[in-house]
Image (cartoon, helix red, strand yellow):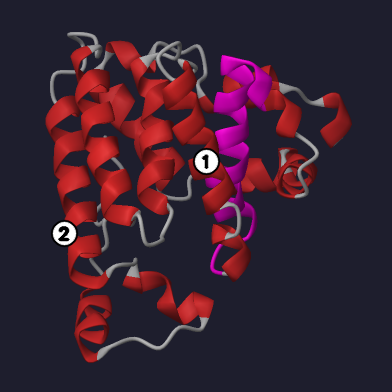
Amino acid sequence: MSATSQDPEDVLAFWFPDTGFWTDQQAFGRWIFDRMQGGMDQAICSRFADLTRAGARGKLDHWAETSRGRLALILVLDQFPRSLWRDTPAAFGQDIKATRLALDGIRNGHAKAAAPWERMFYAIALGHCEGPDHLERLALMEAFCEDLIADLPPSLPDTGNRIRAQNARVREVIERFGRHPHRNPILGRISTPEEETYIATGDFPHVAKGPRPS
């Protein structure tokens, strides 16, 4: 399928399949693990490579005119590059644009129109993007997530605290370093001695340790 024949609903149906994963905590854990830890790499590269390139070139900007289109475009710019261009600088090349889309969507109501598990990817985009306003954005992300958590269904009792714990880990890293140091080798950045010690642990907020949930 070519990029020109794909639309936002193709992306959303792929990322948020109608399997009822939100009705069971274990199924939800498997769903989010696969999306955040590389389990979708092969499918993204085979089905959405051209679309991801089109998004990076600005050819899908019109998607942001609707709430569903904006959500799909955030995925194409923030999530898909991490699979298509994994371990290269291009993996992070659309973070600023994805974050701006998320910020605008929070302001204009597009985000609130999404289901809480869909809104999670607004928050993830805010945490991914580095920059001088990172801590300000994290404060917004945390407030946004509290609203999201309030809308989670009773079937996901553990998810709220997991979101809060993840946000706290991201904040701790940014408060210490002002950036995500585990990206330094990929981006050709020189690490400080403290960052080298941190990188050596291999324990980063956006990289899971341990097996896929059963």
- Spatial separation of the CA atoms under disc 2 and disc 1: 23 Å
Q: Secondary structure at mark 1?
A: helix
- Residue 158, horizontal then vertical, whole percent: 14, 26
Residue appearing at x 25%, y 81% in the figure:
195
- Residue 8, horizontal then vertical, whole percent: 68, 22
For label 2, the crowd category at 10 Å Cα-Cα, with few meaning under 14, some 14 to 19 and many 20 or more, is some
Question: Which region shows up in magenta?
Answer: 64-87
- Residue 84, horizontal then vertical, whole percent: 64, 54
Q: Quadrant of residue 27?
A: top left
Dominant secondary structure, magenta: helix
Q: Is residue 77 magenta?
A: yes
Q: Secondary structure at mark 2?
A: helix
**Residue 188, numbered label:** none
- Residue 165, horizontal then vertical, whole percent: 14, 43
**Residue 100, numbered label:** 1
Q: Which residue is mark 2?
A: 172
Above or below 42: residue 121: above
Task: Identify which amino acid the numbered label 2 is placed on.
Answer: Glu
Q: Quadrant of residue 70?
A: top right
Q: Is residue 169 magenta?
A: no
In-image side of 57 versus 210 (left or right): right
Name the quadrant of the N terminus.
Answer: top right
Which residue is at the front of the view, 84 or 137?
A: 137
Q: Are marks 2 and 1 in contact (CB under 8 Å)?
A: no
In-image side of 54 versus 202 (left or right): right
Query: Does label 2 or label 1 sit earlier along the sequence?
Result: 1
Task: Identify which amino acid the numbered label 1 is placed on.
Answer: Arg
Name the quadrant of the C terminus.
Answer: top left
For label 1, the crowd category at 10 Å Cα-Cα, with few meaning under 14, some 14 to 19 and many 20 or more, is some
In-image side of 164 versus 170 (left or right): left
